[in-house]
Amino acid sequence: MILPVMKLKKSLGQHILVSQGVLERISECLNFGKDDTVVEIGGGTGNLTRELLKREMKRLVVLEIDKRMIEMLKSIEDERLEIIEADARSYRFCSLGEDLYVIGNLPYNAYSFIIENVIRHRVCINEACFLLQKEVAERIEGKRNVGWLSLLVRSFYEVEYVMTVPPRFFRPPPKVNSGLIKMRRLHKGEDIDTNKYVKLLKMLFADRRKMLRKKVDEHVLNKCGVDPEARAEELNPEDTLCIYNYMEEKL
């Protein structure tokens, strides 16, 4: 059942997905089983929540920040459902256990903070599927205009672009297409300090026109096989992880 959309808050960047077919596709994105815990970010009116609950799982935890939406979610009767009033930008995902599966239609004005927080809790998040602006999804996948967030995600997760979702499937319709990405944990770099790594990545992308040798010691770049005259967007995750290993103590 697709519920009607109440008046949404622009401050929360809310766009509710109302296409049954698309909801079904998204609900099938994650590879969880009957003994797993799934976390939905931003349950909203419960459209995706209901689709997810059609599948076998141990528990579905929905994080929602809007009290009005929480009241709507409470109308869903399922003993596996747990609703938590929380901000996904700072929520401690690992408090829910290990081997989590995270999914959500992320608000356009908070996606980077949420994804960064997911990376901070990567040791307990096996997979994630997020609906984002199409351009953002493509950047994170690494196919266009690579930025610091793309390298952060791809350093620890394999990213797959799953599908494009047009504005007509939302209420209210956003001004751009959306894209669904799937992230699978690579089980590496678990000892890396995320704060330091993010600091390095943001430093590398602070002025895209500058050559890397203006930002990083050429000795380090040569050790990592990186062209000193390259720009930040030419880097791949292996490059930035290598640079981090040499610069960690200075960050």
Image: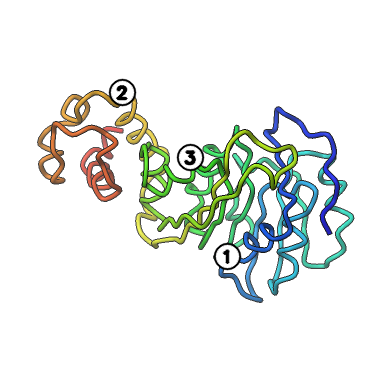
Quarter holding residue 174: top right
- Please say if 101 is above or below 251: below
- Residue corresponding to mark 2: 207
Give the number of the disc on residue 90: none
Label 3 to label 1, Cα distance in Å?
22 Å
Quarter holding residue 228: top left
Q: Residues within 10 Å of mark 1 (few under 14, many from 20)?
A: some
- Residue corresponding to mark 3: 135
Quarter holding residue 214: top left
Report the residue at 61% width, 55% height from top.
Answer: 103
- Please say if 124 is above or below 215: below
Q: Please, what secondary structure does the residue beneath circle 2 have?
A: loop
Scheme of colours in the image:
rainbow
Q: Nearer the viewer, mark 3 or mark 1?
A: 3
Q: Nearer the viewer, mark 2 or mark 3?
A: 3
Labels 2 and 3: the sequence-earlier one: 3
Q: Residues within 10 Å of mark 3 (few under 14, many from 20)?
A: some
Q: Please, what secondary structure does the residue beneath circle 3 have?
A: helix
Image quarter of the C terminus: top left
Q: Are marks 2 and 3 in contact (CB under 8 Å)?
A: no
Residue 222 shown left or right of residue 203 in the figure: left
Q: Are marks 1 and 2 in contact (CB under 8 Å)?
A: no
Residue 238 screen position, x and y as percent = 26, 50
The one of 95 and 47 positioned closer to us in this rendering = 47
Residue 94 screen position, x and y as percent = 58, 55
Q: Amino acid at mark 2?
A: Asp
Residue 42 shown left or right of residue 118 in the figure: right
Image quarter of the N terminus: bottom right
- Residue corresponding to mark 1: 30
Report the residue at 76% width, 31% height from top.
Answer: 9
Label 2 to label 3, Cα distance in Å?
21 Å
Q: Amino acid at mark 1?
A: Leu
